Image (tube, rainbow, N blue to C red):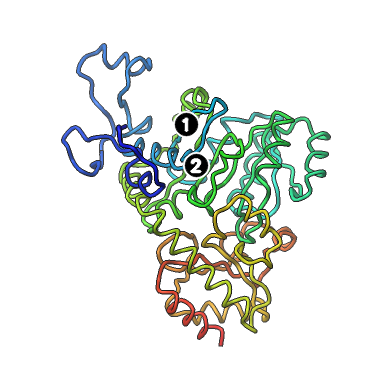
Amino acid sequence: MSNKVISGFSSACVHEGHVQDPMYAHITPIYASSTFTYDTAEQGMHRFEGKEEGYIYTRWGNPNFTEAERKIAALEAFGLQDENGKDLVLKGILHASGMAALTTLFLGNLKAGDAILTHFSLYGGTEEMFQKILPNLGINSIIVDMHDLHATEETLKANPHVKMMYLETPANPTLQCVDLEELTFIAKKYNLVTAVDNTFATPYLQQPFAFGVDYVFHSTTKFLNGHGTAIGGIIIGKNLELMNGFMTKTHRLLGGNSNPFDAYLLTQGIKTLELRMERHCHNAMEVANFLEAHPAIERVNYLGLSSHPDFAIASKQMKHGGAMMSFELKGGLEAGTKFINRLQLCTRAVSLGTCDTLVSHPASMTHYGVPKATREQYGITDGLIRMSVGIESITDIINDLKQALQ
């Protein structure tokens, strides 16, 4: 990559992953090419055999993918060391979407007869994959309250076919947190693969590899891109031999590769990650305090508030409560619908992590495919509103919420 000395996270956001373009372009150009050429037949053979580095076919790799992959891997490893006391080195594989990345993660690590141990309140797409897709392949999921470490371990004792522990912390949309350190310790005792969805926190707020996990997953569509301009997903792993071998092969054969333009947009977005997250988090704390004190609000789920049941866990493994929250109005669904319709500045849309404040209704949007009884068991009621707090002026955000709640 380069010999630049990088000691700060923002510097890593800007400089990591970049290599000098052959034509000396300041910013890596968009390599809009489906295939790549060779100088000789021997060179092509060597690239296919893995004896020589170089690009072959964009489904297999592209300079724009490589820069984004290296940048995100460097951020997840920032300041961390491996078991030998050396700087942690990770490998990322960029995908066309978060769901494509999850598909590679699961199919690259599990086979028929295996099971995944996970918890309640997951992203709706992940939940549906566990319930509607993986069982057809002979891979089932077991849900346990992972706040109860004893129950978690007893479940593993009773189910030796569990091969993976999948954690989403903070979880979508209740902002539930689980203890990465304690759960990774238990997973290692039973030789489980551990994977963590770090989308809500980003590597700026939380680094799961510090607790010994095997994989980190991101929907790069969200805070990493930061501008709502491109879909993407990534898995980052610490077993380099596996990541460069079977996981890469799985990814290539499943065909869920990104594209050069989306990877380019992702790379540019990441450069301002720290700056954006600082403003997101500042605004979210102000909004959470405002909502918690408002007479029309029944409850607020925000990890920066001591009232959140997982406040202590979040404080242990996150730098800040983050930019995401959910809340419920006292009037339930009807009041929530009126509130959303009255918004003037905040944006009515699903997704999250963009510069503008996004407001959505999980029960009818992100979690519409999850049965109502299951949703409500997980705290996703019909009246729950999810908010991704943006980087606008905090005065304008609160004034919009205030008028919408009248």
Nearest the camera: 79 or 148?
A: 79
The spot of residue 384 in percent (x, y) is: 63, 70
Residue type, numbered disc 1: Asp
Are the residues flagged by discs 1 and 2 in contact, CB closer than 8 Å?
Answer: no
Name the disc covering residue 87, or none.
Answer: 1
The residue under label 2 is which amino acid type? Ala
**Residue farthest left in this picture:** 23
Q: Which residue is mark 2?
A: 100
Residue 364 occupies which quadrant of the picture?
bottom right
Crowding around mark 1 (Cα neighbors within 10 Å: few <14, some 14 to 19, many 20+) is few
Question: Which badge, 1 or 2, comes first in the chain's sequence?
Answer: 1
Residue at 40% across, 74% down: 393
Q: Residue furthest bottom?
A: 406
**Where 27 sits versus 298, above or below?**
above
Q: In the drawing, does residue 58 fall left or right of residue 156?
A: left
Q: Residues within 10 Å of mark 2 (few under 14, many from 20)?
A: many
The percent coordinates of residue 350 (x first, y second) are 50, 63
**Which residue lies at the image location 44% right of the left edge and 30% below the top edge?**
252
Residue pictured at 55% horizontal, 25% vertical: 84
Distance from the alpha carbon under mark 1 to that under mark 2? 29 Å
* Residue 49 horizontal side relative to residue 158, left or right: left
